[in-house]
Every structure is written in structure tokens, then in C-alpha cells.
Amino acid sequence: MENVKVYRLNECDAVAAESLEQAKKWYLETTGEESDEQCEQVSFDAMIWEDEFMQRKIPVREILENHWNGTPFIVFSTEF
């Protein structure tokens, strides 16, 4: 997990990947959507809601520890 980072690719989705390029490519192949030009790296200490019931926040680090298996995935997603 030492090489993985989390990138917020647009106002809704953040993807875990080993590079920004890998995150963008995976996101396009998976969702069919381009990422925004202004992508930002998300801190492992950032706190996000655990689920849609919004009763408990957990750090991004915990999500990575539980779900990172070497392939990109959406760490969190919000609806606007």
C-alpha cells in the first residue's frame, strides 16, 4: 500500500491508484467519463462518511487498508 494515493478526479469521485495517470485511465475505462483538469490528491487523514446513512466518519487510510488489492477503485463518491 506504500505506493497508492487517492486522487479526487472531479467534484464527485475519488480513485485509489498508484499514479494520477493510472487513476484517470481506470476511471475513463470504468465510468466512460473524463476526469476534471484540476485533479487533487486526497490526504489519507481526510475523514469521509462511512456510508449513505452518514452516522460515522472514517479516515481514507482505513478504506485503503481494508480494500486496496493492487488495482484502482473508487474510494468515495458523492452526489450533487
Image (cartoon, rainbow, N blue to C red):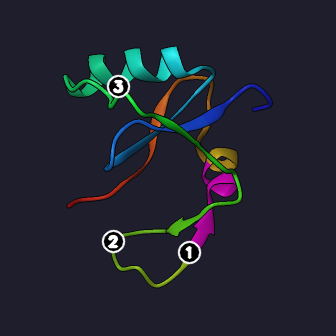
Inter-mark Cα distance, 2 to 1? 11 Å
Q: Which residues are magenta?
A: 57-63
At label 1, which amino acid type do we have?
Lys
Please state if 11 lies on the left or on the right of 18 as rendered.
Answer: left
Q: Nearer the viewer, residue 67 or 20?
A: 20
58 is within the stretch colored magenta: yes
Q: Which label number is shown at residue 52?
A: 2
State which tag comes first along the sequence, 3 or 1: 3
User: Label 3 to label 1, Cα distance in Å?
Assistant: 25 Å
Circle 1 residue: 57
Q: Is residue 61 magenta?
A: yes
Instruction: Name the kind of residue labelled 2 in the image.
Output: Glu
Residue annotated with mark 3: 27
The answer to which of marks 2 and 1 sits earlier in the sequence is: 2
In the figure, 5 relative to 61: above or below?
above
Q: CA distance from mark 2 to mark 3?
A: 22 Å
Q: Position of residue 18 (x, y in %)?
A: 63, 22
* Image height of 44 relative to 51, above or below: above
x, y percent for residue 19:
60, 20
Per the image, label 1 sits on a secondary structure element best described as strand
6 lies left or right of 24: right
Q: Position of residue 46 (x, y in %)?
A: 63, 61
Query: In the displayed image of the protein, which residue is found farthest to the bottom?
Result: 55
In this view of the protein, which residue sits in the foreground, 70 or 26?
A: 26
Q: Are marks 2 and 3 in contact (CB under 8 Å)?
A: no
Neighbour tally class for label 3: few under 14, some 14-19, many 20 plus, Cα within 10 Å? many
| Residue shown at the point (67%, 56%) measured from the top left | 62
Q: Quadrant of the N terminus?
A: top right
Considering only order in the chain, which callout, 3 or 2, is on the residue closer to the N terminus? Answer: 3
Amino acid on which disc 3 is placed = Tyr
Q: Secondary structure at mark 2?
A: loop
Which residue lies at the image location 20% right of the left edge and 61% below the top edge?
80
